[in-house]
Amino acid sequence: MRKRLRTTDPTRTTPLAKQSDHPCFSCSQCCTYIATQIDEPTTMRDYDHVSWYLHHQGISVYIDWEGAWYLQIETRCEHLTPHGLCGIYDQRPAICKDFDWRDCERQQTPDEDPPEKFLFRTSDEFFTWLQKRRPRTYARYRDFLGRKHAEHNDEELARVERAS
Ligand code: SF4
Ligand code: SF4
């Protein structure tokens, strides 16, 4: 599991004149999702599962710049206060403590790469990518799905015939 990072200059610092100048002030975006690594899909079932994830609200899948696949789930941390602060600051998990705000996607400048190489927010976006990047796999998946739907229809027909 991880917070979404991007490659940044670790020496970069931002001088602050006052607290409200801090980029985290009234933001808290990084406390409103979790992201966990998933296996790269290889089988038709795997591709189908990615499609299934993406049919759900608040779910996205992304591939980072090292080629690792992640499932991201929009969900607000229950310790986030109404004022956008951490309610368990002294006891927060290590992943929260280790996260450097200078690495967050909100600090991105227009000339920098986004945190993910490919981001899919919907099943359509995923299959558009698959068709372009892995056209043979896409064609195999369409066949796989067609067969599954045909199987289902046959079962349904048989059930209707038995019932009549
Ligand atoms: S680290 Fe980034 S996303 Fe998190 S509160 Fe600060 S500016 Fe917002
Ligand atoms: S524990 Fe605190 S820092 Fe970590 S996600 Fe929740 S509110 Fe944010």
Image (cartoon, helix red, strand yellow):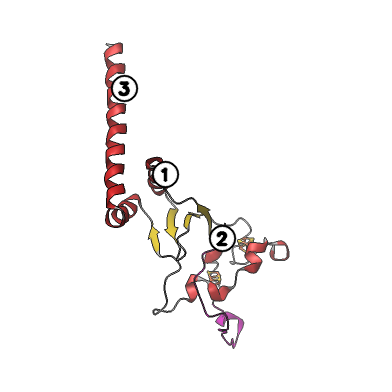
Sooner in the amino-acid sequence: mark 1 or mark 3: 1
Looking at the picture, tell me which residue is in the foreground, 41 or 162. Answer: 41
Question: At 43% across and 55% down in the image, what residue appears?
Answer: 61
Crowd around label 2: few <14 · some 14–19 · many ≥20 (10 Å): few
Three-letter code for the amino acid on which mark 1 is drawn = Asp
Q: CA distance from mark 3 to mark 2?
A: 43 Å
Secondary structure at numbered mark 1: helix
Mark 1 touching mark 3, by CB under 8 A? Answer: no
Reply yes or no: does residue 95 show up in magenta. no
Residue picked out by circle 1? 46
Tell me the mark number nearer the camera, choosing from 1 and 3: 1
Q: Is residue 95 above or below residue 47?
A: below
Reply yes or no: does residue 15 show up in magenta. yes
Q: Give the percent coordinates (x, y) of residue 5.
A: 52, 68
Mark 3 touching mark 2, by CB under 8 A? Answer: no
Three-letter code for the amino acid on which mark 2 is drawn = Arg
Residue picked out by circle 2? 2
Quarter placement of the N terminus: bottom right
Sooner in the amino-acid sequence: mark 3 or mark 2: 2
Q: Which residues are magenta?
A: 1-23
Q: Give the percent coordinates (x, y) of residue 146.
A: 27, 36
Tell me the mark number nearer the camera, choosing from 2 and 1: 1
Mark 2 touching mark 1, by CB under 8 A? Answer: no
Residue picked out by circle 3? 155
Q: CA distance from mark 2 to mark 1?
A: 22 Å
Q: Give the percent coordinates (x, y) of residue 136.
A: 28, 49
Q: CA distance from mark 1 to mark 3?
A: 24 Å
Secondary structure at numbered mark 3: helix
